[in-house]
Amino acid sequence: MAVQLQAWGKSHRGQKRNSNQDSMLIDHDLGLFIVADGMGGMGGPQGGEIASKLAVETAHKIAKETFASGQTVQPRDFIHKIYNAANEKIFARSREENERLKGMGTTMVLCYRKDEDLYIGNVGDSRCYYFSCPYLWQATEDHSLINEQIRAGLIKESQRPTAFGKNLITRSVGYEQEVECDIIVKALSPGDLFLLCSDGLSGLVPDERISDILMNVPTEQIAERCVLEANWSGGDDNVTALVIKAT
């Protein structure tokens, strides 16, 4: 019997922001799940809201059109198409209006189910975690200044929470004319859990605590609990959590 997927999501503006620049998508029919965390251009938060919304809407539109046409597409090509289209849309929009939207962009992490595999695409520092009890792995790699400094040996992992520039990302959707996305694939097995989240969660709640939540909280309540944990930890940023369970 084929593996089935269930998904739950929750998004909140946090305790210190006046708006929510995160966007997400759950589409069981298309097997597409997305979390995007926008960053404002010269116009501030408004640009971030527009960028993340555009990214998710464009991805959804591409997916629906592709499957409605009956085209046979390779999953990796399909994901690249989504990221390229979203990037072009945001980049063009930032230059169609006045200076207030210039420089806007968004992170975007997605999961796409094809047969018995889950394809994970990523640009930016929103994350996909994979949990198989009792182990938690960060499936994606952050495109961030902090991560580059850690990889280069300039700072230690333990310094991540307090390091300078911890919110600076080195790759985003829509900021430049072209974008390169990472893609990895994971064979699905019953019991697998995947958590997509913005850095409003991963930046405030340690991986050890996220692992505890995934292990001990009922699956349908995990997304909401993650948002609560981020807000209990200060709620410095918008926070979005999307949980996918394979059964």
Image (cartoon, rainbow, N blue to C red):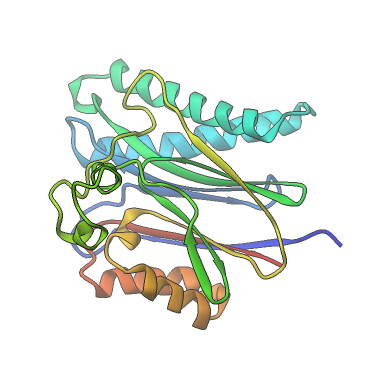
Q: Residue at x 75, y 31 (%)?
A: 68
Residue farthest toward the right in the current orientation of the protein:
1
Whole-percent x and y of residue 153? 24, 47
Describe residue 230's horizontal placement relative to residue 136 as left or right: left
Q: Residue at x 54, y 77 (%)?
A: 134
Look at the image and tell me in which quarter the C terminus lies.
bottom right
Residue farthest toward the front in the current orientation of the protein:
153
Whole-percent x and y of residue 124? 37, 41
Q: Residue at x 63, y 33 (%)?
A: 76
Count the labels in the image.
0
Q: Residue at x 29, y 17 (%)?
A: 95
Whole-percent x and y of residue 40? 24, 37
**Near-viewer residue (186 or 66):** 186
Residue farthest toward the bottom in the current orientation of the protein:
216
Whole-percent x and y of residue 245? 63, 65
Look at the image and tell me in which quarter the N terminus lies.
bottom right
Describe residue 99's horizontal placement relative to residue 77 as left or right: left
**Near-viewer residue (184 or 20):** 184
**Near-viewer residue (54 or 86):** 86
Describe residue 234's horizontal placement relative to residue 217 as left or right: left
